[in-house]
């Protein structure tokens, strides 16, 4: 396994893993926004830049997608690397100046503001990291959202900026969003679940026993379509929340007579 020397700390790591993986193993913090372990890494935000020592010269690289193939020396806390990350943070603050999540991260990086004017005209607090787009495509397989526009007007939207029929309202995009820009809203009076700000809605399935919202009908349809079974009993089970399902299972097990060997 190659050895990565990060700010003087030596870490052995499997070939092909990233500099960010090595830093985590060494207990060294590198700020990230567009990185998530569940999807591919495109280094969109550039916030994880570090310095790579190439012998006679040094190069700024994005640690989240730089693969380790041989012994390397990396500097996270060098003046150049810290200056580059602070510069990126200032640009992000100009894009989302009202974001509490971004402000908290900026404070941890000792960035107390931005010299740039506010430039965003897209969705509020969206920094265009692309995590929501990638998780929808790579993990859910729906491609219900994507990038549209250029420059200041670039934003993440459904096709034609209309509620997408491909959205199953699973909420995966909201889970990975680092800025809290995407939210799952329950319209219980209407029996629907909405993914905001994309305005996509789907029928909401609730627990038949306690009325707790469980998931959307489209999520249920997609999940059951991947189950290979001819068991009608399984397919006809009533929708129950995890708590009620555990209680129902425990009750069924308790009703089964125990055979005692005489």
Image (spheres, grey):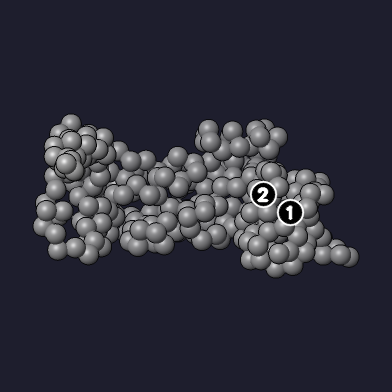
Q: Report helix, strand or loop for mark 1.
A: strand
What residue sits right under mark 2 in the picture? Answer: 25
What residue sits right under mark 1 in the picture? Answer: 11
Q: Position of residue 7 (x, y in %)?
A: 80, 48
Circles 2 and 1: CB atoms closer than 8 Å: yes
Q: Is residue 126 left or right of residue 194?
A: right
Q: Report helix, strand or loop for mark 2.
A: helix
At 74% from the left and 67% from the top, the residue drawn is: 70
Image height check: is 84 above or below 226? above
Q: Quadrant of the C terminus?
A: top left
Image height check: is 35 above or below 111? below
> Is residue 211 at least partly visible in the picture?
no
**Where is residue 102, by image quadrant?**
top right
Q: Position of residue 112 (x, y in %)?
A: 67, 32
Q: Residues within 10 Å of mark 2 (few under 14, many from 20)?
A: few
- Residue at the extreme bottom of the image, as rendered: 69
Q: Is residue 148 left or right of residue 208?
A: right
- Residue at the extreme front of the image, as rendered: 262
Which of 217 and 249 lies nearest the eye of the viewer?
249
At 58% from the left and 34% from the top, the residue drawn is: 103
Q: Position of residue 35 (x, y in %)?
A: 55, 52
Q: Residues within 10 Å of mark 1 (few under 14, many from 20)?
A: some
At 16% from the left and 53% from the top, the residue drawn is: 234
């Amino acid at each position: 396994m190659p050895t990565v020397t990060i700010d003087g700390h030596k870490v052995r790591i499997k070939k092909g893993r990233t500099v960010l993986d090595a830093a985590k193993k060494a207990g060294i913090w590198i700020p990230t926004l567009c990185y998530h372990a569940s999807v591919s890494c495109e280094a969109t935000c550039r916030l994880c830049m570090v310095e790579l020592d190439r012998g006679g010269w040094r190069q700024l690289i994005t640690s989240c997608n730089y693969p380790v193939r041989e012994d390397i020396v990396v500097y996270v806390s060098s003046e150049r690397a810290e200056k580059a990350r602070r510069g990126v943070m200032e640009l992000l603050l100009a894009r989302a100046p009202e974001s509490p999540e971004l402000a908290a991260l900026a404070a941890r990086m000792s960035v107390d503001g931005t010299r740039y004017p506010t430039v965003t005209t897209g969705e509020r607090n969206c920094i265009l990291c692309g995590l929501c787009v990638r998780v929808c495509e790579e993990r859910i397989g729906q491609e219900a959202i994507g990038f549209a526009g250029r420059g200041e007007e670039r934003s993440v939207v459904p096709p034609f900026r209309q509620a997408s029929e491909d959205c199953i309202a699973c909420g995966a995009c909201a889970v990975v969003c680092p800025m809290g820009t995407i939210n799952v809203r329950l319209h219980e009076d209407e029996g629907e679940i909405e993914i905001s700000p994309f305005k996509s809605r789907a029928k909401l399935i609730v627990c038949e026993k306690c009325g707790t919202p469980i998931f959307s009908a489209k999520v249920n349809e997609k999940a059951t379509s991947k189950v290979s079974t001819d068991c009608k009993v399984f397919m006809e089970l009533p929708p129950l929340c995890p708590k009620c399902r555990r209680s129902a299972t425990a009750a069924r097990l308790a009703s089964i007579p125990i055979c005692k060997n005489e």
